Amino acid sequence: MTDRTSLYVHIPFCVVKCGYCDFNSYAIEDPAAHRRFVSALDRELRTARPPRNPWTVFLGGGTPTYLTDESFARLFEVLTSHIDLAECQEVSMEANPESVSATKATIARQAGVDRISLGVQSFDPARLRFLDRAHDVAAVERAVSVFRDAGFSNLSLDLMFGLPGQTLPQWTSDLERALELRPDHISCYNLTFEPGTRLEHARRQGKVQPNDDRVDAELFQWTRRRLRDGGYEAYEISNFAGRGGPCLHNDHYWLQGDYVGVGPGASSHRAGWRGTNAKPLEAWAGAVERGLSGTAEAEFLTPSQRLGEALWLGLRRRDGIDLDALRERLRIDLDPNRDALIESMVEQGHLRRDGTTIRLAESSLLQADRIAAEFL
Ligand SMILES: C[S@@+](CC[C@H](N)C(=O)[O-])C[C@H]1O[C@@H](n2cnc3c(N)ncnc32)[C@H](O)[C@@H]1O
Ligand code: SF4
């Protein structure tokens, strides 16, 4: 029987730290650091005790495929000694084109990984350079062939749009090139200027200008039309399901399911308890090597906070939020403030109400983060 708890495994290493990225990742090449990371992960899996058969597993990062060959192979020995990957509903792994090899693809496939999310971002050499990406277009095509040859039938591509100065014809060309590779799922992220990143620093210094909001809205609307016509279902603002269906792991997360997170900076959630691991390799590995928990911070979310987060996460999904089902699940009524906020957003046309379900209006999808944040 599959447990309804999922497992997230964070692999923090990357060949370069991209200027726009605020995920917990660092450019560490040292094979000894990779070995130490995998051993510490083994220790953490012993103490964190995720279920033997999680609902879904997601190996993310960072760049899982950047691990040295030796550590990559060891990672899957460790994982399969704790987890029956073959029993999970979905086992996803993120990959970057420059570090994909037939050996790694075969190891992952044989261990039970059945879904790949490949970070492509763009097919334009100048935009890849702007994003600090370590790969070229040929590496993307090579990586797709390698994964297909290794037997992966569920392959997703990550793209980014709304880069400074990007026009509709430029973005059209990127997305069309991606579609030629016949991915089973596509994620299209609108570039965000995250606090603390080099990109945000450059913006503050006036060295880069964010793209015009109206142009981004045009790119986004075109994306939705083009992917719908191509047979991809927009089940979440940035995510489009083709033959591979939606990403079950991310859907589980957006629906506030329980999950155990291992690796530096990973968070875990169980019925309103949320813990987050230490982010630096040394702090996290040092703790778990001493037999301690990797958790550096923990909090119990109040029912009201959980409600706010459910609204925030749920509004990104096409299915929206069934308020009655939400009340039942969290055993809490909507407070008068949030009730009034929903009313006013329906009046302003940001939200649509359909029986007990609320959804973001099509015209407000791109402002989801700002609108949803008001419920927190
Ligand atoms: C954190 S990355 C990990 C996967 C892999 N290392 C990669 O670079 O593709 C997951 C995805 O998030 C997206 N992403 C990261 N930072 C972003 C940002 N500031 N704005 C928009 N999308 C972003 C990228 O499309 C990336 O593929
Ligand atoms: S976007 Fe991916 S490759 Fe770039 S730094 Fe972030 S996690 Fe690493």
Image: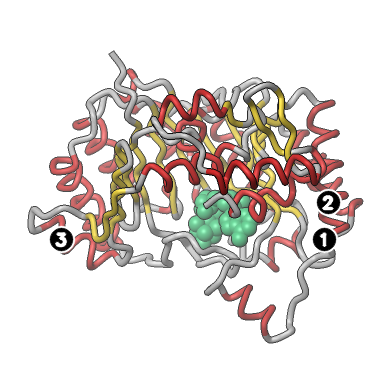
Is residue 129 shown left or right of residue 258?
A: right
Q: Which residue is drawn at 19% across and 53% down?
A: 40
Q: Mark 3 points at which residue?
A: 287
Vertical relation: 144 (above or below) 241:
below
Q: Which residue is drawn at 31% across and 36% down?
A: 271
Is residue 90 shown left or right of residue 218?
A: left
Q: Mark 1 points at which residue?
A: 213
State the separation of the CA atoms marked 3 and 2.
Answer: 46 Å
Where is residue 157 drawn, in percent x and y?
Answer: 63, 40
Label 1: which secondary element: helix
State the separation of the CA atoms marked 1 and 3.
Answer: 45 Å
Q: Which residue is drawn at 34% across and 37% down?
A: 259
Is residue 111 shown left or right of residue 39?
A: right
Given the current orientation, which residue lies at the most extreme left position?
A: 290
The dot on residue 217 is 2
1 or 3: tag closer to the N-terminus: 1
Judge the density around disc 3: few (<14), some (14-19), many (≥20) Cα neighbours within 10 Å: many
State the separation of the CA atoms marked 2 and 1.
Answer: 6 Å
Is residue 116 shown left or right of residue 275?
A: right
Tell me, yes or no, whether the two marked residues, 2 and 1, touch with CB atoms within 8 Å. Answer: yes
3 or 2: tag closer to the N-terminus: 2
Where is residue 356 drawn, in percent x and y?
Answer: 63, 24
Find residue 12 and report its image quarter.
Answer: bottom left
Q: Nearer the viewer, residue 215 or 81?
A: 215
Given the current orientation, which residue lies at the most extreme top position?
A: 1
Quadrant where the N terminus is found in the figure? top left
Hey, what amino acid is under mark 3?
A: Ala
Find residue 214 and report its image quarter.
Answer: bottom right
The dot on residue 69 is none
